[in-house]
């Protein structure tokens, strides 16, 4: 399934595993093929919500039944409560992979530019703190950072609003591991991302070393991946660059640790 291949692609990169050129090419071809074969299903959603839902890609019936809620998990394991987040994250994760190769294909550029215009007409495409629009704003920032990293003003503007909201709310504002994944990717481009990482570095070190249960039957199966996300975040700082050689392992007690 496309969802599984998109997740695997991201997970390999996060865990510093090799993605071959042929693997990437097959995934790109699969994404483009799926974009061309969903016109009817997309029309149903777009009739009700012209810009708020994807224009090119939706989960298949089989993918939608992977979870009891019919929503697909983010690549870091958090489970959305709404189709708004689930469907948009699905499309944006796929298009982000296309954005890595955008210079090579006119069709890809067309899809990406059309999605840019759609996002400009949404609240979460700028920043929205209502419900899961906040989560989705984070997904959009990660997409922008891959597709248009030179648009640093826009990226930083959204990022600062997200950070401000996180800092000033007592609620679980955003999916934390997707946040750290995004910040780890932004840190080379955004001083604000790096500064937020530095402020939370001691907390992250503690979480990296702490034992987390690994259960293949629920979201705990993502915990080894999440340890790698934390490591990738910490090594963006000069203080913790020594952790680039740190490893994540599963102990006999069924927990994963970072060392």
Image: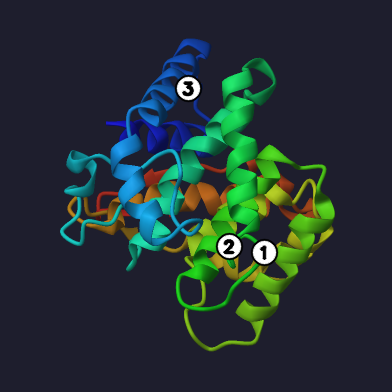
Question: Where is residue 166 drawn, in percent x and y?
Answer: 61, 78
Can the viewer see residue 77 in this picture?
A: no
Q: Count of labels shown?
A: 3
Which is in the foreground here, disc 2 or disc 1? 2
Q: Which residue is mark 2?
A: 122
Q: What kind of element bears circle 1?
A: loop
Contact (Cβ within 8 Å) of mark 2 with mark 3? no
Contact (Cβ within 8 Å) of mark 2 with mark 1? yes
> Which quadrant of the figure has residue 4?
top left
Write the residue at 29% across / 51% down: 221
What color scheme is it?
rainbow
Q: Which residue is mark 1?
A: 126
Q: Which residue is mark 3?
A: 28
User: Of label 2 and label 3, which has the lower sequence position?
Assistant: 3
Q: Nearer the viewer, residue 50 or 222?
A: 50
From mark 2 to mark 3, how far is it between C-alphas? 26 Å
Q: What kind of element bears circle 2?
A: loop
């Amino acid at each position: 399934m496309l969802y599984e291949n998109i997740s695997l692609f991201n997970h390999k990169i996060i865990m510093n595993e090799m993605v071959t050129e042929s693997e990437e090419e097959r995934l790109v071809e699969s994404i483009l093929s799926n974009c061309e074969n969903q016109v009817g299903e997309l029309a149903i959603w777009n009739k009700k919500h012209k810009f708020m839902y994807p224009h090119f890609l939706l989960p298949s019936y089989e993918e939608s039944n992977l979870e009891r809620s019919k929503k697909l998990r983010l690549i870091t394991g958090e489970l959305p409560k709404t189709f708004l987040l689930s469907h948009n994250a699905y499309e944006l994760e796929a298009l982000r992979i296309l954005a890595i190769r955008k210079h090579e294909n006119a069709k890809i550029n067309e899809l990406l530019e059309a999605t840019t215009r759609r996002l400009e007409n949404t609240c979460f495409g700028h920043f929205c703190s209502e419900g899961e629009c906040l989560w989705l704003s984070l997904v959009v920032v990660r997409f922008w950072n891959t597709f248009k990293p030179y648009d640093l003003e826009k990226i930083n503007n959204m990022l600062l609003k997200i950070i401000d909201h996180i800092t000033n709310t007592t609620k679980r504002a955003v999916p934390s591991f997707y946040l750290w994944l995004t910040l780890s990717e932004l840190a080379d481009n955004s001083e604000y991302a790096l500064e937020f990482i530095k402020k939370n570095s001691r907390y992250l070190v503690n979480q990296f070393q702490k034992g987390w249960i690994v259960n293949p039957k629920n979201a705990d199966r993502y915990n080894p991946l999440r340890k790698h996300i934390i490591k990738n975040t910490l090594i963006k700082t000069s203080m913790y660059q020594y952790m680039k050689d740190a490893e994540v392992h599963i102990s006999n007690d069924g927990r994963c640790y970072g060392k």
